[in-house]
Amino acid sequence: MAKVIVIGAGPAGIMAAIHASKKHNVILLDGNDRIGKKLFITGKGRCNVTNAKDISEFFDYIPGNPHFLYSALYSYTNEDTINFFENAGIKLKTERGGRIFPMSDKSSDIIKGLSIGLKEANVQVKLNSKVTNIIYNNDKITGVEINNTTKLNGDHFILATGGASYPLTGSRGEGQKFAKSLGHTIVDLKPSLVPIELNEPWLKELMGLSLKNISLSILKNNKVVYKNQGEMMFTNYGMSGPLVLSGSRYVKNDGNYEVSLDLKPALNESELDKRLQKDFLKYQNKEFKNSLDDLLPQKMIPLIIKLSNIPENKKVNVITKEERKNLVYLLKNLKAKIKGLRPIEEAIVTAGGVNTLEIDPSTMKSKIISNLSFAGEVIDVDAFTGGYNVQIALSTGYIAGSSI
């Protein structure tokens, strides 16, 4: 039996270790004092472990190299993930958008399920064991150095160290540095699924305001590159929330970007105009500033009044058709200039990583180093929120472990 050393005890590394152990002796190394440290905080501590959509639909939610993941996702599907956890006694539930969570709403239950899997597979887990160097010669790895002191030899190595987001959980992009030192090409690491910073003076007026059922578009040089519907919230630096995080994937350093909000996506401009006329009739003897309570959140009204250029004290019954049409347009197209993205340390996921062209997609083995495999976020793959990223980690981990 070969000795397989898996570096990184996140979902990808754990799944790789479990499946490699069916044929080999496996040691799982992690620099933290417990397994699944980043997993513990995902989904606001609830851990969105996968999605209930048909596996064929997953690829629509993976902007980062979806074709590379075809083998992995079809070899180990969301149904396999569900079965794995339910067989470990972890009950799951499905929420809006197909998101699957533990019934308890505690990510610790998902980690418990993975721990049970490791125990049943007799994987030797070594915590507080940070890999500080990889020893190799003649295009083959011979061992790893742990905590700058201990050397551990092995026959095959799986790198599952994650990305560079949430550095406090131990993922600092070190796996990518190791891969580069071994001759692999690294696609630049960038934040993905990260809050967006705005460059607007009115931002502080909306801080803390959450909006639901709105449509958000990201425009690059006035051309729409992303559009979706859902919820978001304003922060002291810009905006966050599910819609914003997904949209951030399309913001780069190659143009002028702005965000456009449709506050009433269920109504087209004509329908919204009729709705406004109805409200204006109801409040016809009031001032404009007192006529929008039925239409908008209280916190947003002063801003919309200011941007509409309609005097706040103007009586509703003398607002012109032209002014009303401009107001409709504003409600359907509230625009803000994007200053940039929050730092990679705040990103849920890292885009970039080991170039997929240098990895065999059907085995996750390196095409450069004969006894090296990769799994999870260390690879240049990333997806939107909704359980897709954890599923990618589990699926690539499965293939990496079972292909040795």
Image: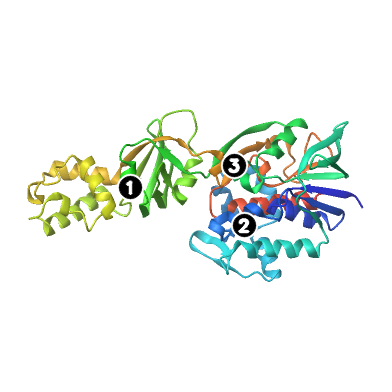
Numbered circle sitting on residue 350:
3
**Residue drawn 82% across and 48% down?**
5
* Label 2 SS: helix
Q: Quadrant of residue 197?
A: top left
**Which residue is under mark 1?**
206
Estimate the x, y position of residue 351 in percent, counting from the top left. 59, 39
State the separation of the CA atoms marked 2 and 3. Answer: 17 Å
For label 2, the residue is: 40
The residue nearer to you, when weighing 294 against 358, is 294
| Residue 43 in which image quadrant | bottom right
Q: Residue at x 28, y 55 (%)?
A: 297
Give the SS element for disc 1.
helix
Name the amino acid type tagged 2: Phe
Along the polypeptide, which appears first: circle 2 or circle 1?
A: 2
- Check whether the beta carbons of the residues at disc 3 and disc 1 lie within 8 A of each other: no
Name the amino acid, label 1. Leu
